[in-house]
């Protein structure tokens, strides 16, 4: 079950919300949320729901053990981290490692085909953050397993983030209050995120998927740029749309999740981009990997090594493919460039700020070409076509023109406009506040009609 499905929007979420609001106590509401979360996950993963429960119990027990065993705390933490990463590697990287071993050695070991549990990267990182926080003494271990399981399985952020750290919601797990105004804001936030997903990301995904799966000989300079730009908008509005829906649902139930995107395509440097893009993931790696490695406290050379390690891990977190690893290292290299090049140290104003925006968009777009590509050869071919694909035969041009329908062009324009903070600032003005609810209801109706019509509605998180 995904957020942008009629079953979820029309049945599951309204039913859970209605019962939740009727219950008088947090204890009853937590039981309802836990049951709903397990049902939500089991709807699509009837077997792997037990894996998630087992992972939650292991980390619950590990935290209690670490807290009680002062002398062996570090050893126990190491064992817990290895166990969590081991489970993640078994399900996510076994086939990749077997294929890599075969290609390097010439052997023909059988490559296991293991189905990937949805959201395993998200709930594993959340579980690890809880255990590490207990080890550091930043939180007390939770003695009630139900709260730990609810924290890890809470359905608004279970399958697509944002990655929620335990210390950010510790108090709200136990004690929170229902507020009509907050719930109303959450509903509007959810509808806004649904609009991003259904009316922008899905249309951009249709363009990107059509072009990236087309025969290579049919891709010219126009198709390459169109596909790259479409995927750049698709992945942003897919990720940020799901984050908005998760944050909105959190507000409906009394939780306050941190922002996950802040107009990243308005950044003026790659460093600035990563302060705005998938903030919960970059924050997790900064807090639990970069700083423990030494951060920037051990000289510039060690800082660069630490950053490259972090970005290699960031790439591999997304999936078992060389393209993801390359994407992470690619961003790490541009961060190193900005670390050493004097031109990036100066404050940008005027035309320099505009040049910074153009630089970020180009770097990020090319990076996402490799992120989307099935293999490195396709990524390199695509980038070559973006700058040298000067062939305009009928098949190539027909492919491009088939993607320039009024619906796709409208979604393209909406995506570009919504990528900059203009609309957000406009929505904060008092005259606009009066039409937020009518506009939200219209947007919800349009999304529902779009979904009811069987429109293209991919779930790209199956790759991650």
Image (cartoon, rainbow, N blue to C red):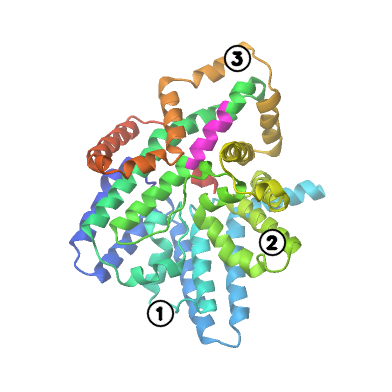
Toward the top, the furthest residue is 394
Report x, y in % for residue 430: 26, 44
**What secondary structure is marked by label 2?**
helix
User: Decide: marks 2, 3 in contact (CB < 8 A)?
Assistant: no
Q: Residue at x 59, y 45 (%)?
A: 348
**What secondary structure is marked by label 3?**
helix
- Whether residue 217 is visible, yes or no, is yes
Q: In the image, is 76 to the left or to the right of 184?
A: right
Dot 1 or dot 3: first in sequence order is 1
Report x, y in % for residue 404: 48, 20
Report x, y in % for residue 180: 21, 57
Tell which of 283 and 164 is nearer to you.
283
What number of labels is visible? 3
Give the label on residue 306, or none: 2
Task: Inspect the magenta stretch and tell me whether residue 111 lies in it.
Answer: no
How dense is the environment of label 1, judged by Cα within 10 Å: few (below 14), some, or many (20 and up)? few
């Amino acid at each position: 079950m995904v957020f942008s499905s009629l079953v979820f929007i029309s049945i599951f979420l309204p039913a859970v919300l209605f019962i939740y609001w009727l219950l008088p106590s947090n204890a009853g509401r937590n039981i309802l949320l836990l049951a709903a979360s397990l049902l939500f996950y089991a709807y699509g993963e009837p077997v792997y729901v037990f894996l998630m429960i087992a992972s939650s119990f292991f980390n619950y027990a590990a935290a209690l053990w670490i807290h009680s065993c002062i002398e062996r705390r570090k050893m126990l933490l190491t064992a817990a981290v290895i166990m969590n990463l081991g489970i993640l590697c078994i399900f996510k990287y076994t086939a990749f490692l077997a294929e890599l071993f075969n290609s390097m050695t010439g052997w023909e070991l059988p490559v296991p085909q293991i189905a990937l549990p949805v959201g395993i990267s998200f709930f594993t990182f959340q579980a690890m953050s809880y255990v590490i926080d207990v080890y550091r003494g930043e939180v007390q271990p939770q003695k009630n397993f139900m709260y730990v399981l609810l924290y890890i399985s809470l359905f608004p952020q279970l399958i697509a983030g944002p990655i929620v750290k335990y210390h950010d919601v510790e108090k709200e797990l136990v004690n929170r209050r229902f507020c009509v105004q907050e719930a109303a804001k959450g509903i509007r936030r959810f509808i806004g995120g649904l609009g991003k997903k259904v009316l922008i990301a899905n249309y951009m995904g249709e363009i990107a998927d059509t072009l990236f799966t087309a025969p290579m000989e049919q891709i010219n300079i126009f198709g390459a740029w169109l596909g790259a730009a479409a995927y750049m908008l698709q992945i942003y509005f897919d990720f940020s749309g799901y984050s908005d829906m998760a944050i909105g649902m959190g507000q409906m139930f009394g939780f306050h999740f941190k922002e996950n995107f802040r107009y990243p395509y308005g950044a003026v440097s790659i460093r600035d981009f990563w302060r705005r893009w998938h903030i919960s993931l970059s924050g997790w790696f900064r807090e639990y990997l970069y700083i423990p490695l030494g951060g920037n406290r051990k000289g510039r050379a060690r800082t660069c090594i630490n950053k490259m390690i972090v970005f290699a891990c960031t790439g591999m977190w997304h999936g078992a493919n060389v393209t993801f690893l390359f994407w992470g290292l690619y961003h790490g290299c541009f961060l190193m460039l900005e670390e050493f090049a004097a031109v990036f140290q100066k404050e940008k104003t005027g035309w320099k700020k505009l040049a910074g925006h153009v630089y970020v968009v180009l770097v990020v777009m090319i990076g996402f070409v490799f992120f989307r590509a099935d293999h490195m050869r396709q990524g390199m071919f695509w980038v070559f076509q973006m700058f040298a694909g000067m062939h305009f035969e009928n098949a190539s041009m027909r492919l491009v023109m088939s993607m320039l329908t009024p619906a796709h062009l409208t979604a393209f324009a909406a995506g570009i406009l919504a990528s900059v903070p203009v609309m957000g600032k406009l929505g904060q003005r008092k005259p606009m506040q009066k039409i937020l609810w009518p506009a939200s209801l219209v947007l919800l109706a349009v999304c529902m009609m779009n979904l009811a019509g069987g429109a293209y509605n991919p779930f790209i998180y199956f790759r991650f």
